[in-house]
Structures are given as C-alpha cells and as structure tokens.
Amino acid sequence: MGRLFGTDGVRGVANADLTAEMALGLSVAAAHVLAEAGTFEGHRPTAVVGRDPRASGEFLEAAVVAGLASAGVDVLRVGVLPTPAVAHLTGALGADLGVMLSASHNAMPDNGIKFFARGGHKLADELEDRIEAVYEEHRTGAPWDRPTGAGVGRVRDYEEGLDTYVAHLVGVLPNRLDGLKIVLDEAHGAASQVSPEAFRRAGAEVVTIGAEPDGLNINDGCGSTHLALLKAAVVEHGAALGIAHDGDADRCLAVDHTGEEVDGDQILAVLALAMRERGALRSDAVVATVMSNLGFKLAMEREGIRLVQTAVGDRYVLEEMKQHGFALGGEQSGHVIVLDHATTGDGTLTGLLLAARVAESGRTLRELASVMERLPQVLINVPDVDKSRVKTSAELATAVGEAERELGETGRVLLRPSGTEPLVRVMVEAADIDQARSVAGRLADAVKSALG
C-alpha cells in the first residue's frame, strides 16, 4: 500500500491490504501516540468507534475495539453511523479519539480507517506519520507496554448515538421543511437510518431508495456516484427535490424536481447566498478548490461573494477555512463543510440546509441553482509523461498561453499533475462544449509532445 495514510485515512481492499492485524496494530499505535502527546493526561481515555455497513466493517470494528481496549482506552461503540456523526459524537461526548471504519464512495470490497482527534477534528499530519512509524516499529517485533487488571479499557455500546446526532442536525436548521416531498438515496450506506429520520423530524415527506444495506450492496449502482435511480424516483414521485449520499454520507449531491443534477458547486452557490442573507457567511467568502466550475466563480463574482480557492481535496478546503475563520467551503463532488455546525463534510446536514432554503424561499431548487451556469468542462488524462515538468516546460507554457487567449474570460485551462499516477490531467472549460473539446485535445497533444 506504500505510505499507509492517504488524504483520508488508511484505505485498501479489506482482508487483503487492510487486515484485522493492521486495524488492531494501528489502533494500539494511535492510543500510544496520543498518550505520548499528552492527550490522555490526567484522565482515563475514551474513544468513539463507528462504521459503515460493509461486511468487512464487522471484523475490522472488532479489531479496532480490541486494540484500543488493550491499550487502556475505554470504547463507546456507536455502530453504523455516518463519518460526520462519528466526528460530531467525538466532540459532543468529550472523547479523546474517534475512529471511523469506511471507504466512503469506494466499492464494497474496500474499507478504511480514519482517526479523529479530540473535538472531532482530523488528526494532524505529524500525528498520522507518528502513528504509522510506531505501528511499523511494533509490527516487526518490538513489544508493547500493555496495561493489566483494571488498567485495560472497557467497551460498551452507545445506543443513543443516532438520536444525539439527528437532534443536532435538526436543531441547527434555520427553518422547517414542512410541505416538501423529498427523495433520499442513501447508497445502502451509513446514513440509511440517520438521514430519513432527520428529514422526517424536520417536517419533510420522505421517500427512500437505497436504504436497505445488507453489508454487500453499499454504493452498488446507487448513491451520489450513480444518480440515475434518484433522478427517475424524483420525477416518478413528483418530489420537490432529491438528495444522494455516498457510503459514509460525508457528501451530498442533489436532483431538482425535473430530474436534473445539482452538483456540489451549485449547492455551494445556493448555500452561500442563503447564509449571507442570514448574516452567517463570515467575510462574505466561500472556499472551493481549483477544480470548481468557472461558472461558480463567475456567479460568486456577480453576487459580490469572494471565492477563495485551494488545491484539490476537502482537507485543503478545511485547512483554509479553519485558518481564516471562513464558514462555508466545499468541492464539486459534494463535500460541503459548514464549519459552524460540523468539523468535516456532512452530506445529511448539507441536504437538510439545501431543502431548508427551498422551503424558506418558496422557490424550486432548479430556480435557486440557476444562480450559476455550469460551463462545459472537458477532462483528459495524459498518461506516461514526466509530470514533474508541467510548470517548467516552455513549450507547454506557450500552448497554454495560446489556449487561454482563445478562450478569453469565458473559459479556463488547468493542467494538474496526478498525485498518485504518472499522468497529467488537462481540464478545459468554455462557453461551448465543442470549443472545450477542441482546446483540450490540442493541449493533450502538447502535453505528450512536451513531456513525453
């Protein structure tokens, strides 16, 4: 697997890359590293452990719980809940550590482990590096310092987790959802109980699809990565809108009453205007990545909202928000962070806030989302090139300059080296799809010529 920790915890094929032994070892290592860092100073430590419904989550959860308890950490096992629920409960219960077992939108055979620090925040990179180093040291034979007797951790189920989290979600809404019929696609994932319960408590009439997880069907042809079923269901039921989550419900995409997709950029635009109207959009700014559609940028400029852009990845969006105190940020993929109410992307909260805006405004989601026009976007991956020379090649710089002059202010070019593969991603936006394809094709040829 190379370096174990990626941008969103440790992931791999369960029982092949990510084994029970690894889950146990990483959990023990996390407990020791946090103890060394002083997190447990002066009290008996507690961890919150949750998972999505994948079959492999059952044995991985057992391994994580065993590892933590063997290291002297008391465990509150919350069962199947979304990633943002585990983050919230870690903070709300005053726990020292949170652990989520999920591979998000990945296919069922994958799984992952994600650690949260006290307060429900992502662990600092240096702590992840230290956990990995300690895990490797002990995996090769160094003995652990193990507590005995009353020093071992105790384990209990925390069955109030769902109600606590749902009450939090409904409690932060600016208004109720009475009168709205909403279709929810839960991806047979972690929000299959939470999300319908939250929308119903908020007053919506709810129709659910993809809400019967059996451990094997998570993300299988449904959820935020497969919107066809949701689009059809919204039209069939005459719903006001549809909401789709991924397997761990940290993201949200939507569908309007006509069955048209509303992506993360459009959701951000709708929420930004709603929050500014309520005086909740600090600094009148929203944070998004460089992959956000140019139409989003143009819409924010027109509405007088400042757009702060980061590298691709919700972790970079969150870092920018926390550093400068911004209230709203997210990605085109549907990771939306409302920092006043969540420490991570929260798909259920995002969907509730979007529906609340529809209910409060009396306007359709289609009308609200029309605040921005999605410009045609073409993405071409150019493999087997020297991605390290993207910024230094004079030949490529000339080609990019020519493309930018052709596109003018209604188009955009972005060349991005892949973080994991020997390829360069060419992204072109233009007012016309044919022009976008033409420019992208020429730039892909230029990348092959200059960097091949």
Image (cartoon, rainbow, N blue to C red):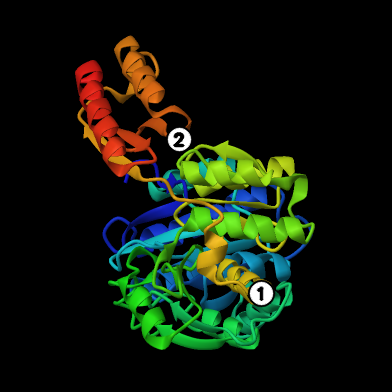
Q: Is residue 119 visible in this depiction of the protein?
A: no
The residue tagged 2 is 410
Q: Quadrant of the C terminus?
A: top left
Mark 1 neighbour class, 10 Å CA radius: few under 14, some 14 to 19, many 20 or more:
many
Provide the secondary structure element on which disc 2 rests. Answer: helix
Residue in front for this viewpoint, 3 or 265:
265
In front here: 385 or 79? 385
Query: What residue is rendered at 49% in x and 68% in y?
Result: 249
Q: Amino acid at mark 1?
A: Leu
Where 226 sits versus 391, above or below? Answer: below
The amino acid sitting under disc 2 is: Thr
Marks 1 and 2, how far apart in space?
39 Å
Residue 264 visible: yes
Callout in the foreground (1, 2): 2
Q: Residue farthest to the top? A: 394
| Residue 78 relative to residue 238: left or right | right
Residue 277's spot in the image, x, y percent?
75, 59
Quarter residue 307 falls in: top right
Which numbered tag is attached to residue 25?
Answer: none
Q: What percent of the width, then of the height, locates residue 88? A: 65, 67
Give how far across and how far down residue 198 sits, in percent. 60, 82
Residue 70 occupies which quadrant of the picture? bottom right
Could you say which quadrant of the image residue 215 lies in?
A: bottom left
Q: Which residue is mark 1?
A: 169
Dot 1 falls on a residue whose secondary structure is helix
Above-or-below relation of 317 to 406: below
